[in-house]
Structure formats: C-alpha cells, structure tokens
Amino acid sequence: MNSGPQTRKGMLDRPMIAKMFKSASAAFESASKSMVVGVALMASTLSAVSLPFDEAIDFLKQKVATTTDGFRDVWDAAHSKMFMVAGANKKALVDDFKSEILKALEKGTTLEEFRAGFDDIVKRHGWSYNGDRGWRTRTIFETNLRTAYAAGRYAQMTEPDTLATFPYWQYHHSGAIHPRLQHKAWDGEVYPANDPFWTVAYPPNGYGCGCFVTPVSRGGLRRMGKAGPDRAPDLDQLGTDQPRGVDPSFAYNPGMAWLSQTSPGPKAVTADEANIAAFVTSSLKGKWPDGSWTPVGVTSGKSATTLKVPAGTELRLPAATIRANADNDVSPDAYALVPKRLLKNGRIKRDRKTGAVSLVGDIDGRHWIADIDVIETGNRHQVQIQSLRSEPSK
C-alpha cells in the first residue's frame, strides 16, 4: 500500500482525529496506522487535508473536466470519470476548479485557503453561481476531497494481498452532531468486502456525509465478538429506485466506478438517463407492474411529421416491453440512451406489408432497431416501444 507522506506535526492532536481513531477497526490500525489517519481525515475536512496519497490523487487527476448547466447533468458513477462543478459551463472555468481541488489534495490546503482560490477563479471568469458562498465552497471542497479519499482507500483495500488478509469491511458513522439516522444505524456493521451493499452505499452517501470504511481481518471480527459478518440491510424502497439511506446521485462506489474499465457502448450519465436505467433494472426484477412506463424521448420536427403525431409527443418505454424482451441482451444504459438518439439521428422505417414502424440507425458500431407502436385515442397520441435490439453495423 502507498500511504503517502506522513501527517504534519500537530494534526493528530485535534479532537475529531482522536475520536475517529477510537472508533476505527483495530485490525485496520494494526495493518496501516497511517491509513487510519487518512480515513479519519476523510471523515472531517474542517481542518487541512494532511495525508495525500497516490491513489486519491490519481483518482482526481484522471477525471475529465466536464461543463454542466446544473448538478443533474452528471449522475451517480459518472462522477468517478468526470470532474464538474454544478453550473460551471466553460471548460477553462472547470479546469481551474479542478486544479484548486487537486492543490488541496496534494498540498494540504484548508477550506479557507480553497475559498480564497474560489473567489479568485470566480472573479477572473466572471462566473455567477447559485447559493450562498459559504455553503457552496464547503460543498465543492468537502465532496470532492471525501470522494477522492474514498476512491483511493478502496483501491488500496482491494489489492489482492490486502483482501486476503482483510476480507471484511466495517461501516463507520462520522459522529456528526446531526446524523443521518440511517447512516448511524449502519455504524459498526461489518459486511464481506464483496457484498453488493458496497456497490451503492460505500460512503460518502450524500452531501456532507463523513462516514467511512475500514477493513477487518478474521481475527478482528472475532475480537469484536462477532461469529461472522453482519447481514447487509435491504436498501430497496417502495415507490422509488433510490437506495435507502443514500442521497440522489450518490448511489455508487467511487473507487469501484473509477477502477472499472468503461466498456464500449452507451453510458447513462445524466439524472434522467440514470432514472431510465434504474426503471429498466427494477422492471426486470418485477418491481414495476404491467401498465407502468417511463419516457425515453420526445418527438420533434421530422420524426413527429413522419409518425403523424404532434411535436413533443413522448416516446414511452413500458415495463412489460422490458420484460418481454429480456433475452435481447440490451443493457439498462442502452435503453436510457439509444431510443433518444434514434429519434434525433436515426430514420423511421415502415414495413410496406404489415405497416409496422421502427426507428433504425447506427450507434457506436451497432445497428439498432426499435419497433414502435403509434396509438391514437381520439385527439390523443401515444408512441410506445415494443422492442429494442441491435446487431453489428454492416
């Protein structure tokens, strides 16, 4: 493991660090005391970041600066590949913010020092932002640093030798004065490192969340008085695809998303796209009944004229369609992006014999076909997807 430079003198005297040391796993402490310090600091960025390490720095450096109009433009795991500041819609502006955060991670600057840099960037670019300065700067500073630390520690804890020695991970609540009750309920729980819980609830689990994870050995588990790991909670919530205890756009594991290779093909990165992908996944599990649907696109211009429907008519994806076409091997991300792109850049094909209508087009080296049904009821029109499939482009 690469633990990076040692902590600056005097930092360990802070009450918050002492408190986090006390709650940290004994196994983790014996394995790498400097890592415990780093995890403790991850839980509180009230003071300077004082323990930079290569994995966290690499995580931040490898992010691509991305312009946005709002926080919903980048969603969930896409944050591990993209650096953004909500509403920063010029690349030079985003690049400067990324450099300022990277400086905080590498050199150990304080929140107040970051705020000075923030003010300078805002002035130079003439950027007008929403929200109170104090709240906005703290959110940018803490969220980015905590996520970088989380991703870096995940990379260290999943090294083969480390996993062999520490096959369990323990969830720790930050000790906040006003805690999220769900996060507090998970405090001290130990789950296998490969438990699905960690794919969506690996902290931080929301803005301002200071929770963190430490690895636990088999011996450490016994010293806790546990005969085995705890049973992970059911994160499913009736009426929503948002996992219990996890804020919107935090339902991912920063380190896992960073280290995983981005496979070819479409990827859902916006809030709307992520919601469609979640609807597909839930429909395949039977969570949404027949009759349920989600919009995946809107007709406009040529597509509306050709389909003989008013511009702005929704293209709907029914839950029943998803289940009926489960064998087509279409990913949730593809459902989220392909129909919209076919409406915009594809063509509408009508079978001369049957009158069947399809949206067709080539996307990322694949030829896609979306069979659709236009339903007219009085003055109302509906356009529904009946199937979605692909084949290699010719």
Image (cartoon, rainbow, N blue to C red):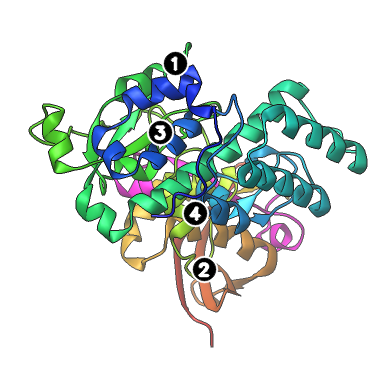
Q: Are the residues at dot 3 and dot 1 in contact (C-beta closer than 8 Å)? A: no
Mark 2 to mark 4: distance in Å? 27 Å
Q: From which residue to which does the magenta span run? A: 281-310
Q: Residue at x 52, y 72 (%)?
A: 368
What amino acid type should be assigned to the residue bearing mark 4? Answer: Glu
Mark 3 to mark 1: distance in Å? 14 Å
Q: Are the residues at dot 3 and dot 4 in contact (C-beta closer than 8 Å)? A: no
Mark 4 to mark 1: distance in Å? 29 Å
The residue carrying mark 2 is: 265
Q: Is residue 76 above or below residue 114?
A: below
Q: Nearer the viewer, residue 268 or 77?
A: 77
- In the rendering, which numbered label is found on residue 55? 4
Q: Is residue 297 left or right of residue 68?
A: left
Q: Position of residue 394 (x, y in %)?
A: 54, 88
Q: Are the residues at dot 4 and dot 1 in contact (C-beta closer than 8 Å)? A: no
Outermost residue to the top: 177
Q: Are the residues at dot 3 and dot 2 in contact (C-beta closer than 8 Å)? A: no
Q: Are the residues at dot 1 and dot 2 in contact (C-beta closer than 8 Å)? A: no
Label 1 crowd (10 A; few <14 / some 14-19 / many >=20): some
**Where does the N terminus fall, quadrant-wise?**
bottom left
Q: Is residue 42 above or below residue 198?
A: above
Q: Is residue 191 left or right of residue 311?
A: left
Mark 1 to mark 2: distance in Å? 40 Å
Q: Residue at x 42, y 18 (%)?
A: 175
Q: Nearer the viewer, mark 1 or mark 2?
A: 1
The residue carrying mark 1 is: 179
Mark 3 or mark 1: which comes first in sequence? 1
Q: Position of residue 283 (x, y in %)?
A: 36, 46
Mark 1 or mark 2: which comes first in sequence? 1
Label 4 crowd (10 A; few <14 / some 14-19 / many >=20): many
- In the rendering, which numbered label is found on residue 212? 3
